[in-house]
Image (cartoon, rainbow, N blue to C red):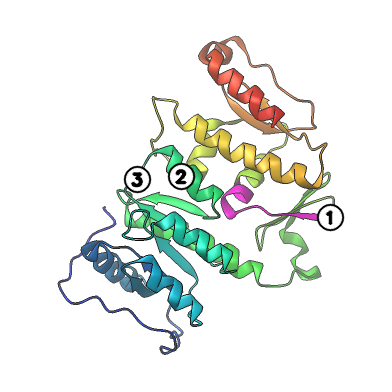
């Protein structure tokens, strides 16, 4: 099912700051920023049917004005290509102004460079418009569950929702990671990748499994049948950098060339068996070695 499942020829209605408060039945308020009138109208109707309140904008400038005037939402769905100011510039402006609302890029652009730029710029997720509505709803729910939890103080009663492994502490209720008591500023996606590996210590986790965690099972992207590996490496590189920002000796994410990664004891690179190593090209192994050095 495409993200566009309904159409409506009625004029676009964009609620303004100061509008009435959400009802108790409303799941969350969403800002949809997209210059495609049909897509914007259709998706806003679909989201409304799912219980969301949607504030729509046809360009980046009105959305920024909305926030400047005190408007608030729980998630921003942001298109990339728009007139005058494209989506990545809107995101930069938001972060520069201290607007930390979670952002999901929702775009027709599928090249990996756009996804990496979006995540590096502070977006929490990147979803192609060709994906089903159910995938978008799932991504939104993951973000809402994480951010709502992050606003609550962790107390002794939530100890059962904390996972500890050596110097690593994962607070599952609010998706926070700490290393030696110091918070690691992970995005929700990065937290989930760390959780996947750390809750299975010393167990090899494949590129495909990590990629499926990020994008959903069976999603195909990248160049060639294994193009998704570069996307996973980019995530791992950023995660390593964030841990090393608080501990230069951090070395718990170990490489398994040609296969994936594992959360280990800082022993470095794992040697795969003949079958796995035969599937790993020289360039693939080289990229993993570079990632380990980063």
Pick whichever of labels 2 and 3 is earlier in the sequence. Answer: 3
Whether residue 110 sits left or right of residue 178 in the image: it is left
- Give the spatial CA distance, label 2 vs label 3: 8 Å
Can residue 207 be seen from the camera position used here? yes
Residue at (66% x, 44% y) in the render: 194
Examine the structure image and report whether residue 238 is included in the region drawn in magenta: no
Can residue 216 be seen from the camera position used here? no
Q: Nearer the viewer, residue 163 or 93?
A: 93
Label 1 environment density (alpha carbons within 10 Å; few <14, some 14–19, many ≥20): few
> Residue under circle 2?
115
Residue at (72% x, 31% y) in the render: 202
Examine the structure image and report whether residue 182 is included in the region drawn in magenta: yes
Between disc 3 and disc 1, the foreground one is 3
Between disc 2 and disc 1, the foreground one is 2
Whether residue 242 sits left or right of residue 100 in the image: it is right
Label 2 environment density (alpha carbons within 10 Å; few <14, some 14–19, many ≥20): many
> Residue under circle 3?
109
> Residue under circle 1?
181
Residue at (46% x, 32% y) in the render: 228
SS at mark 3? loop
Image location of residue 275, percent across then percent down: 55, 12
Whether residue 168 sits left or right of residue 106 in the image: it is right
Q: Is residue 276 above or below residue 27?
A: above
Q: Which residues are magenta?
A: 181-192
């Amino acid at each position: 099912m495409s993200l566009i499942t309904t159409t409506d020829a009625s004029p676009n209605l964009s609620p303004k700051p100061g509008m009435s408060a959400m009802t108790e039945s409303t799941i969350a308020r969403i800002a949809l920023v997209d210059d495609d009138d049909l897509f914007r109208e259709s998706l806003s109707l679909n989201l409304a049917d799912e219980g969301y309140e949607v504030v729509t904008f046809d360009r980046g400038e009105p959305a920024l004005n909305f926030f400047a005037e005190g408007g608030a939402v729980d998630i921003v769905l942001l298109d990339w290509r728009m007139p005058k100011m494209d989506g990545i510039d809107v995101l930069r402006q938001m972060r520069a102004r201290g607007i930390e609302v979670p952002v999901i890029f929702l775009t027709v652009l599928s090249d990996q460079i756009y996804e990496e730029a979006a995540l590096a710029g502070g977006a929490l997720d990147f979803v192609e418009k060709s994906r089903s509505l159910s995938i978008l709803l799932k991504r939104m729910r993951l973000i809402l569950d994480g951010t709502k939890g992050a606003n609550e103080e962790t107390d002794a009663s939530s100890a059962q929702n904390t996972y500890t492994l050596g110097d690593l502490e994962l607070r599952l209720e609010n998706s926070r990671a700490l290393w030696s008591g110091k918070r690691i500023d992970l995005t929700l996606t990065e937290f989930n990748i760390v959780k996947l590996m750390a809750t299975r210590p010393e167990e090899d986790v494949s590129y495909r499994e990590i990629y499926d965690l990020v994008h959903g099972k069976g999603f195909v992207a990248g160049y060639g049948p294994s193009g998704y590996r570069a996307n996973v490496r980019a995530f791992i590189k950023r995660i390593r950098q964030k841990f090393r920002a608080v501990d230069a000796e951090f070395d718990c994410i170990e490489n398994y060339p040609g296969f994936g990664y594992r959360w280990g004891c800082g022993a470095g690179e794992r040697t795969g068996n003949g079958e796995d190593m035969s599937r790993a090209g020289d360039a693939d192994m080289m990229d993993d070695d570079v990632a380990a050095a980063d």
